[in-house]
C-alpha cells in the first residue's frame, strides 16, 4: 500500500503530479471554472467585494500563496487568516464577503468554527476540501474539492499542493464572475496550471541531490528559510515541515525582514534555505534576494538556494544550489515546495524519526 516506499509521506510526495492533475480535472469546462457544489447565485459571486481565506497550518500557507494570485486576478482585497485568530476577533463580514475555508480533512475544529461564525454574519462561505462530505463542505455555500486522494502521512504534502491549485481555481472563478478576466484569459491561466504536474514530475526526478544534502545537514541546530513574494509562504511551509518531522528549530522569514531582526540569528555554518524568484519576470525581487544571500553568506551562513534552472546570477552565492524548472511566477510555489518537503523528510529519517507519525501531532485536529 506504500507502493514500495518506506513511508506513506514519501509515496504522497511522489503522487503530487497526479494530485495536481486530478484537482484540475473537471474544474474547467472549456468556457469557465466549475465548482463542485454551488448553493449560491452567480450574482452572489459577482457581488463579492472582499475575500478572507481562513485555515490552519499548511492549509493556511496555501492561502498565503493564493493571496498573490487572487488579488492580482480579481482586484479584490484578500486577507488570509489563521482560523483560530479569525474566530476570536470581530472580523468585518457581510453578505458581500467571501470566506474561503481551506481544509484537507474538512473537520478541523477552528476552521469549522470560523465557517460558522462567518455564516452567522451572513458572509458567503466557499470550502476547499479534500474529503467528500466532511463537515466544513457540508456547512458551506459552495465547495471546490481537491482530489489529492487520501493523505495518510500526518504532514501535509500532496494535499498542500492541491490546495494551492484549488485556491487558484477559486481566484479564477471570481475573476470570471467579476469580469476582471476574459474567458480566454481564464483558459490561458488554466492551461498554465495544467502544465504544472509535468513540472513537479521534473522536480521529483532530481531529488537525490536534496536527500544527500538533508543527510549532510541533519545534525544542525536550526535551519532558517527565506523567501519573498510567493516564495515567502513557501519558506513558512518549509520551516513547518522541518519542525514537525525533524523536531528541529526552523523558521521562515520574509527576506525583506532580514535587517529588521532575523539577520542577528545568522552564525557560522547555520543552514539558510533561500527560495529564489525567477530572474525573469520580477527581476527587482531577484536582485534583492541575491543581495540578501550575499549578506548572510558574508556572515557565515551556509546558503542552500532553490533557484530556477539557468539562474547564473545567484550561483556564486549558493553553497548548495537546488534547481527547479522555470514556471510562471505565481505558480512557482507548486515546484519550489517540493524540494523542501523532501529535505524535511530526509533530515527526519536521518535523525531516526517516523515521518508518517510525528510526535504529538494528529492528522485531523478536531479539538481546539
Ligand atoms: C502540516 C499539517 C497541518 C494541517 C492543519 C490543517 O503538515 O498537515 O498543519 O495543514 O492541521 O488541517 P486541515 O487541512 O485538515 O484543516
Image (cartoon, grey):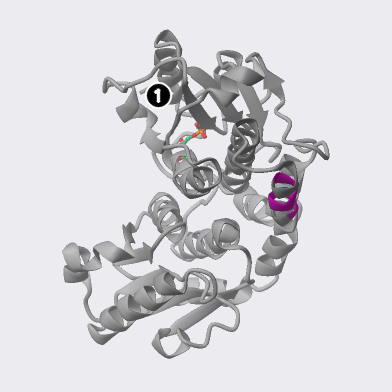
Residue 167: x %, y % from top left? 58, 39
Image: magenta residue range: 186-191
Residue furthest to the top: 120
Quadrant containing the C terminus is top left
Q: In this view, does 182 lie to the left or right of 137?
A: right
Residue position marked by numbered label 1 in the rendering: 110
Q: Does the magenta stretch include residue 110?
A: no
Do we see residue 152 in this rendering?
no
- Seen from the viewer's position, the closer of residues 182 and 220 is 182
Residue 306: x %, y % from top left? 50, 72
Quarter occupied by residue 168? top right
Q: Is residue 127 left or right of residue 198?
A: left
Quadrant containing the N terminus is top right
- Which residue is depicted at the point 33% across and 70% down? 220
Q: Where is 45 relative to 139, above or below?
A: below
- Which residue is depicted at the point 70% across and 28% down? 35
Count numbered badges in the picture: 1
The 10 Å Cα crowd at callout 1, few under 14, some 14 to 19, many 20 or more, is: many
Amino acid at each position: 500500500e506504500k507502493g514500495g516506499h518506506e513511508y506513506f509521506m514519501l509515496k504522497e510526495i511522489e503522487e503530487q503530479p497526479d494530485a495536481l492533475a486530478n484537482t484540475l480535472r473537471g474544474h474547467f469546462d472549456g468556457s469557465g471554472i466549475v465548482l463542485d457544489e454551488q448553493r449560491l447565485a452567480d450574482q452572489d459571486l459577482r457581488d463579492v467585494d472582499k475575500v478572507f481565506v481562513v485555515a490552519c497550518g499548511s492549509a493556511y500557507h496555501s492561502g498565503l500563496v493564493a493571496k498573490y494570485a487572487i488579488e492580482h486576478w480579481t482586484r479584490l482585497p484578500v486577507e488570509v487568516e489563521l482560523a483560530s485568530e479569525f474566530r476570536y476577533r470581530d472580523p468585518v463580514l457581510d453578505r458581500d464577503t467571501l470566506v474561503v475555508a481551506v481544509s484537507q480533512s474538512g473537520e478541523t475544529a477552528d476552521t469549522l468554527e470560523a465557517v460558522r461564525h462567518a455564516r452567522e454574519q451572513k458572509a458567503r462561505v466557499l470550502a476547499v476540501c479534500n474529503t467528500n462530505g466532511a463537515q466544513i463542505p457540508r456547512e458551506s455555500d459552495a465547495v471546490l474539492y481537491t482530489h489529492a486522494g487520501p493523505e495518510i502521512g500526518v504532514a501535509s504534502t500532496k494535499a498542500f499542493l492541491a490546495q494551492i491549485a484549488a485556491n487558484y481555481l477559486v481566484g479564477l472563478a471570481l475573476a470570471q464572475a467579476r469580469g476582471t478576466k476574459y474567458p480566454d484569459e481564464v483558459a490561458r491561466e488554466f492551461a498554465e496550471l495544467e502544465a504544472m504536474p509535468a513540472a513537479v514530475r521534473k522536480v521529483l526526478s532530481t531529488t537525490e541531490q536534496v536527500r544527500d544534502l538533508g543527510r549532510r545537514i541533519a545534525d544542525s541546530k536550526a535551519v532558517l528559510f527565506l523567501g519573498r513574494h510567493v516564495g515567502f509562504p513557501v519558506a513558512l511551509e518549509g520551516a513547518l515541515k522541518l519542525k514537525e518531522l525533524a523536531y528541529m528549530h526552523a523558521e521562515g522569514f520574509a527576506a525583506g525582514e532580514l535587517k529588521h531582526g532575523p539577520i542577528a540569528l545568522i552564525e557560522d555554518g547555520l543552514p539558510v534555505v533561500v527560495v529564489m524568484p525567477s530572474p525573469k519576470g520580477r527581476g527587482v525581487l531577484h536582485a534583492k534576494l541575491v543581495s540578501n544571500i550575499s549578506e548572510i553568506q558574508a556572515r557565515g551562513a551556509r546558503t542552500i538556494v532553490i533557484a530556477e534552472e539557468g539562474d547564473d546570477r545567484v550561483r556564486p552565492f549558493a553553497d548548495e544550489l537546488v534547481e527547479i524548472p522555470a514556471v510562471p511566477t505565481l505558480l512557482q510555489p507548486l515546484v519550489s515546495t517540493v524540494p523542501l518537503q523532501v529535505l524535511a523528510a530526509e533530515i527526519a529519517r536521518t535523525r531516526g524519526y517516523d515521518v508518517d507519525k510525528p510526535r504529538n501531532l494528529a492528522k485531523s485536529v478536531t479539538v481546539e
